[in-house]
Amino acid sequence: MKLRGPFGRGYRTAVPGVPRRGTGKVGRTLFLPPTGRVEAMEKRLDATLGAVKTVQPPLAKFYNSLSDEQKARFNSLRLASRPAG
């Protein structure tokens, strides 16, 4: 499969780690039985939880260092990023 347009050869070189067809974890995960897919999802969720636990304390420290005005602006960014509806 050749990528064309904005996702051509330049994209593969600009973004390291772009998987190629039939390689990497994605290719192996597609052919796992249902129990294997659940295990793979659990591993991804564990990795995500680990990332959240790593980032949360410094982010809380940063947030607590903000003034009330800065916190209001920071919170408005979060609300603006949510889809309406």
Image (tube, rainbow, N blue to C red):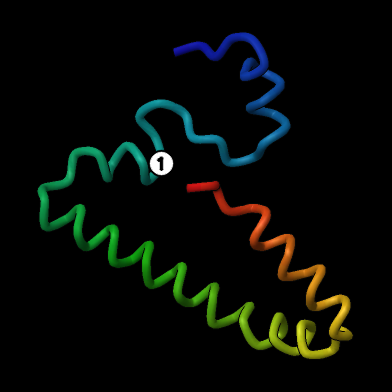
Image location of residue 72, percent across then percent down: 79, 74
Q: Is residue 39 left or right of residue 67?
A: left
* Pick the front one: 12 or 80: 80
* Pick the front one: 37 or 55: 55
Image location of residue 22, percent across then percent down: 35, 29
| In the depicted structure, whether residue 41 falls above or below residue 20 | below
Counting other residues with Cα less than 10 Å from the Cα at mark 1, is it few (<14), some (14-19), or many (20 or more)? Answer: few
* Pick the front one: 18 or 48: 48
Q: Residue furthest front?
A: 85
Give the quarter of the image for residue 75: bottom right
Q: Residue at the location (84% across, 89% down)?
A: 65
In the rendered structure, which amino acid carries the disc numbered 1?
A: Gly
Q: Is residue 3 left or right of residue 41?
A: right
Q: Is residue 17 left or right of residue 60?
A: left
Q: Is residue 29 left or right of residue 80?
A: left
The quarter of the rendered structure image containing the N terminus is: top left
Q: Residue at the location (58% across, 41% down)?
A: 17
Image location of residue 83, percent across then percent down: 55, 47
| In the depicted structure, whether residue 76 falls above or below residue 81 | below
Q: Residue at the location (44% across, 69% down)?
A: 47
The residue beneath circle 1 is 24
Q: Secondary structure at mark 1?
A: helix
Image location of residue 30, percent across then percent down: 24, 39
